[in-house]
Amino acid sequence: MKIGIDKIGFYAPHLYVDMNKLAVRRNVEPEKFTIGIGQEKMAVPPITQDSVTLAANAALEVLDENDKEAIDFVIFGTETGIDNSKSAAVYVHHLLGLNPHARTVEVKHACYGATAAIQMAKGHIALNPESKVLVLASDIARYGLNSSGEATQGAGAVGMVISADPAILALEDKSAYLADDVMDFWRPVYSDKALVDGKLSNEKYISFFAKVWEQYKEKTGRELKDFEAITFHLPYTKMGKKALKPVLEETTEDVQERLKANYQISTEYNRNVGNIYTGSLYLSLLSLLEQKEDLEAGARIGMFSYGSGAVGEFFTGILQDGYREHLKIKEHDELFASRKEVSVDEYEAIFEETLPTDGSSIELDVNSDPAQIYLAGVTDHMRRYVNKEK
Ligand code: CAA
């Protein structure tokens, strides 16, 4: 039985800051951010968007009534959840009006969470072929104003329906994975900003990719030539390139050129959104599928997932006949085209805005947020979410 991605939706907040302008303000050459890091625009989440609303808006784009009935498992991968106990999945389950006979959980291992969710979903579908699983990957990347990681912030979500006989990408069974206790990036429960050893995180990312790729080759006998494209978790768009480069030496120039060209296409959306942690790999996959018009059904796509701390996994999928008809290319063009630029001053002010943590109530100004689902306020430590159409 084929199991994989049947639908894939995406949402990013409607505001962004231009990386050239941020560089000037930080006294950095703009090329460092646009070429050295590889980012053009960074999504800026207004206070009315959190990981729950971003995920709900992403899923909203793709779910129909049939999915809402068939989904009996919602798995929410995030490292910027809003509660240490209650899962973010149950809020989305309610906001989207899903079948009450469902399981809802949140899973965490840094940016690897959604990949873990997909593997869990695959097992669930193998046992229950009629079911569908909603996998959510949603985060707001925050390192701090003027911090070393600032240029690699971002916000957004990807929502995927995992099912039998998927319309878009059938996941293959063999994958390679690796875990090691590393302090390259983490966020203590008392902090709303991530802590990071940037150099170590880069090194670990590259070495995890090299190791899982070796293990994958041993397990399957496959080589680079068997891949049309390899997509990567993209904390910033230069990162995957650094990991891919040494491995490319194993293959012919033709294959190298193909993988490099397709890598470039797979970075397009991420370059304009920034790091969305759990969703970054899937945003990159989406960028490849939507932006490369001549990608043929039957092509094998590799995916490298990396979650600091650290877990890495290399897994693969085969594009299905007619997959392009199931993508939301026009909607995503519109999403990018309708975003509004904020100045660096505005971005800084939005970054500093926080919700009360002392139990006091707040009503948020929701009029400027065009999203269908948003956070309206907080009362007695409870977030109040609104789905305008419900
Ligand atoms: N023109 C062109 N390029 C320039 C330039 C210029 N004027 N000035 C500098 N550069 C280049 C540098 O040569 C460098 O390129 P290479 O990496 O290819 O050598 C690049 O710009 C970045 O320069 P620095 O290394 O000096 O940048 P930095 O010290 O400011 O740190 C960073 C960069 C480590 C990515 C930092 O932003 C950071 O810590 N980010 C958060 C952590 C992160 O994203 N780690 C990635 C792996 S971990 C992961 O994947 C999990 C996750 O999501 C967090």
Image: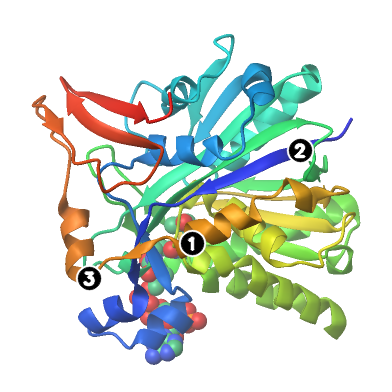
**Residue type at the position of mark 3:** Val
Mark 2 lies on a secondary structure that is strand
* Circle 2 or circle 1, nearest the eye: 1
Q: Which residue bears the numbered disc 3?
A: 344
Q: Which residue bears the numbered disc 1?
A: 336
* Circle 2 or circle 3, nearest the eye: 3
Q: Residues within 10 Å of mark 2 (few under 14, many from 20)?
A: many
Q: Position of residue 50 (x, y in %)?
A: 34, 40
- Which sits in the foreground, 284 or 212? 284
* Circle 3 or circle 1, nearest the eye: 1
Mark 1 lies on a secondary structure that is helix
Q: Which residue bears the numbered disc 2?
A: 4
Residue found at x 27% / y 66%: 342
Residue 152 as seen in the image, left or right of residue 346: right
**Residue type at the position of mark 2:** Gly
The mark that comes first in sequence, 2 or 1, is 2
The Cα–Cα distance between marks 2 and 3, rounded to whole angstroms, is: 41 Å
Residue found at x 84% / y 50%: 318
Quadrant location of the N terminus?
top right
Q: Position of residue 254 (x, y in %)?
A: 86, 82
- Which sits in the foreground, 179 or 292? 292
**Residue type at the position of mark 1:** Phe
Quadrant location of the C terminus?
top left
Q: Quadrant of residue 152?
A: bottom left
Q: Position of residue 276 (x, y in %)?
A: 46, 53
